[in-house]
Structures are given as C-alpha cells and as structure tokens.
Amino acid sequence: QVQLVESGGGLVQAGGSLKLSCAASATIFSINAMGWYSQAPGSQREWVATITNDGESMYADSMEGRFTISRDSAKNTVYLQMNSLKPEDTAVYYCYAQFGDRNSLSWGQGTQVTVSS
C-alpha cells in the first residue's frame, strides 16, 4: 500500500490561487501514476489531473490552462497548482496513486478547497 497525505487546501476568493501537495510514503518511481480528483457536495468524484511515472501530465478539459500538476521525486510529492479559481472549483480534492503490476489504487484523505465569489 501507498500512504498519501494531502495538504494546501483552504478558502480563497474567486480569481485566486492555491497549491495542493500530496506526499507519498513510497518512492515516486515505484508508482505508475499519481493525480487528483475533486468531489463537490452532492456530486460524484471527478478526475482533475494525472502525472505519469514518465512525467507526462494530463488534465480534465475544464481545468486545462488553469491547473498545473507537477512532482518532486526527491520529496515523493505531487503538487496541483490551481490558478484563476472559480466558485465551481469548490470541492474536496483527493490525491490518488496507481502502483504495482496491477495498477493498485490508493487514496489520500482529501483536502477542502473553497472558492468564494
């Protein structure tokens, strides 16, 4: 199993920025991919972004251009830089990791992001 701990959520005004962090208990190079999902109240969890072990990054259409996923392999940490935040970005953001031959999945506990208008 891979333990994930998120941080960096909070309250921000529309147009502002936040940077989320996700620290993994395992070496990032042993992980196939990491990324983020968001879940707004009363809604299903939605994919936000992924970064692969090769460093390739992918984004949901609604986030591309505003959000940037990156990683620091030395710190076993993945980041999500969120700019130009909108009230509709308000959600709990969950970090995930896919690892091993079967692409097993681990989730973090989530961090709340609230964007006020």
Image (spheres, grey):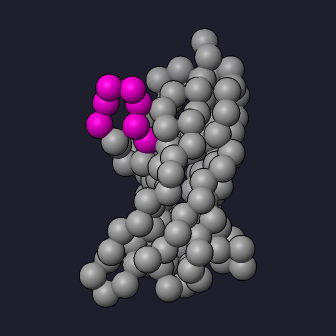
Q: Quadrant of the C terminus?
A: top right
Identify the residue shown where x is 71% and y is 74%. 75
Residue 26, x across and y down, in percent: 56, 80
Q: Quadrant of the N terminus?
A: bottom left
Residue 116, x across and y down, in percent: 62, 17
Please say whether residue 96 is visible from this viewpoint.
Answer: yes
Nearest the eye: 6 or 59: 6
How many numbered marks have been drawn onto this rendered protein structure? 0
**Majority SS type along the magenta span:** loop
Apparent side of residue 70 relative to residue 47 in the rendered image (left or right): right
In the rendered image, residue 39 lying in the magenta stretch gets the answer yes
Work out whether 86 lies above or below 37.
Answer: above
Residue 114 found in image quarter: top right
Identify the residue shown where x is 39% and y is 26%. 41
The magenta segment is 38-44
Please say whether residue 56 is visible from this viewpoint.
Answer: no
Residue 106 found in image quarter: bottom left
Residue 112, x across and y down, in percent: 56, 36
Identify the residue shown where x is 65% and y is 55%. 21
Work out whether 23 lies above or below 91.
Answer: below
Apparent side of residue 44 relative to residue 77 in the rendered image (left or right): left
In the rendered image, residue 63 lying in the magenta stretch gets the answer no
Residue 35, x across and y down, in percent: 47, 59
Identify the residue shown where x is 69% and y is 26%. 12
Nearest the eye: 48 or 92: 92
Nearest the eye: 83 or 111: 111
